[in-house]
Image: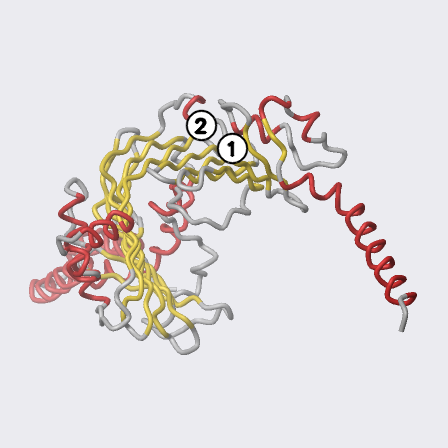
Amino acid sequence: MPLTRLTLRVSFQICVERLLVIAQLTPRSVMVQIFHSIVAISVFLVSPTCEAVDSADSSRTNAVATWRGYRSEVASADVEYVRVILKPDKLASVDVDEVVNAIRELDPLNPDHSVDSILQIVRPELLEKSEQATLNRNFASRSQHLLVQGDWERSIDSTTEHLLRDGLHLFRDVENRSIHGYSRGRCLIWYPQLSWFRPIPDEIQYPENAWVTSDSGIIRIGGWNPANDKLEVGDGSWVEVDAESLLPRRWNRVAMPENRLVRVELSEQYTSYPGGVKFPAVRAQLDVHNNLVTQVILTLVTKASFNSDLSPELFVMNAPTGWSWHDLRQEPSQGGRFGQPVSDVGFFFAGRAPIENSPTVADAIPPSEVEVGTSIWKYWTPFLLILNGLVLIGIGIYLWQRPR
């Protein structure tokens, strides 16, 4: 194992003390040579080479410990942001480095200009002053709001809403006037969660045999693959972290064994927000195929605060009269319509908990609050099958008895 910087300094100090003791017995010419040697050793100890050796030797260990601390420092979050999802035209050739360089120059506090900068590269036709271009642009870019309190989470935009609370995931679709209930972790509709904004690497992804390099305040840790084999420096997926904070700046996802780039993730413009949390104001994901960008997901944080108590009322979803509901937590799924306004949809679904001997719809909620819909057909199915059989038998008897 290479000597650390501290070990070298201690050894050097001991040598100097011993030299001073024997200085009186040593001729002057010899002392001059010893002095030159001491100067050379001193220059080595403060040189970047020694610092790099020591930094590379301990950077992964320090990073793993720091990452664990980051995972537990956010108790609550209130984040306002603009989200952009863009796919280039199939005939367009959008270079990865061009998009990366543009994202690093964005101003999150001027989201309109920032969105235009990305559109100019990825989808320039959306900048045209036409009604269709405006509609497409509004669909691609949305203002959103994320609230987190412990394991409760709520994401809101103009057309959709997600609420995660007490093992339940509710999805509100304004355009279709419907609310879907899932068991937590079963909803496949993606939206930016807290882990999206500030992804923290996991030590499992970067084992002890991962390669490490350091340059200009950036530490790169990589070389992981499913076989857990050490690769050459530069091979495999890698993450770049800031040498001071150890928070990720860039993440290259590589498909092995062909060492093919499939995704680039960027975390830029880390800002210290109220609540003592350092958070990237610019976050992006670039999907890549043949070194060309196929999709860009971008978020620009316009306002954020952390670790303050949020009111439980902020984590309540309501539903107007006539909206449909769909309980997808168990098979067969059930659904219906709300007969009157419901102030807390989570409480409504809690009364329909998917457990053994769960109450029926009539027992779980007052009849005035819901009109049972498609689920009632399961009770008529046996009678319809019997009726269909009787009709077929009657037709068969008629055809057999009629004159030939």
Q: Dot 1, crowdedness within 10 Å: few (<14), some or many (≥20)?
A: some
**Colour mode of the rendering:** secondary structure
Q: Which callout, 2 or 1, points at the residue further toward the start of the chain?
A: 1
The numbered disc on residue 349 is none
- Residue beneath label 2, please? 315
Amino acid residing under circle 1: Arg
Res. 166 visible in picture: yes
Query: Where is residue 326, by image quadrant?
Result: top right
| Secondary structure type for disc 1 | strand
Res. 22 visible in picture: no
Q: Dot 2, crowdedness within 10 Å: few (<14), some or many (≥20)?
A: many
Q: Nearer the viewer, residue 25 or 112?
A: 112
Q: Nearer the viewer, residue 262 or 394?
A: 394
**Is 377 displayed left or right of 190 in the figure?**
right
Residue at left offset 72%, top offset 30%? 359
Task: Determine the CA span between mark 2 and mark 1.
Answer: 8 Å
Amino acid residing under circle 2: Phe
Q: Nearer the viewer, residue 280 or 352?
A: 352
| Secondary structure type for disc 2 | helix
Residue at left offset 55%, top offset 39%? 181
- Residue beneath label 1, please? 165
Against 106, residue 305 (above or below) is above
- Residue furthest out toward the bottom: 258
Q: Marks 2 and 1: CB-CB under 8 Å?
A: yes
**Is 362 displayed left or right of 310 in the figure?**
right
Residue at left offset 26%, top offset 64%? 88
**Is 250 displayed left or right of 48 in the figure?**
right
Query: Where is residue 173, by image quadrant?
Result: top left
**Which quarter of the rendering shows the N terminus?**
bottom left
Point out residue 58 in the picture as x, y percentages from the top left corner: 35, 55
Point out residue 155 in the picture as x, y percentages from the top left corner: 39, 37
**Which quarter of the rendering shows the C terminus?**
bottom right
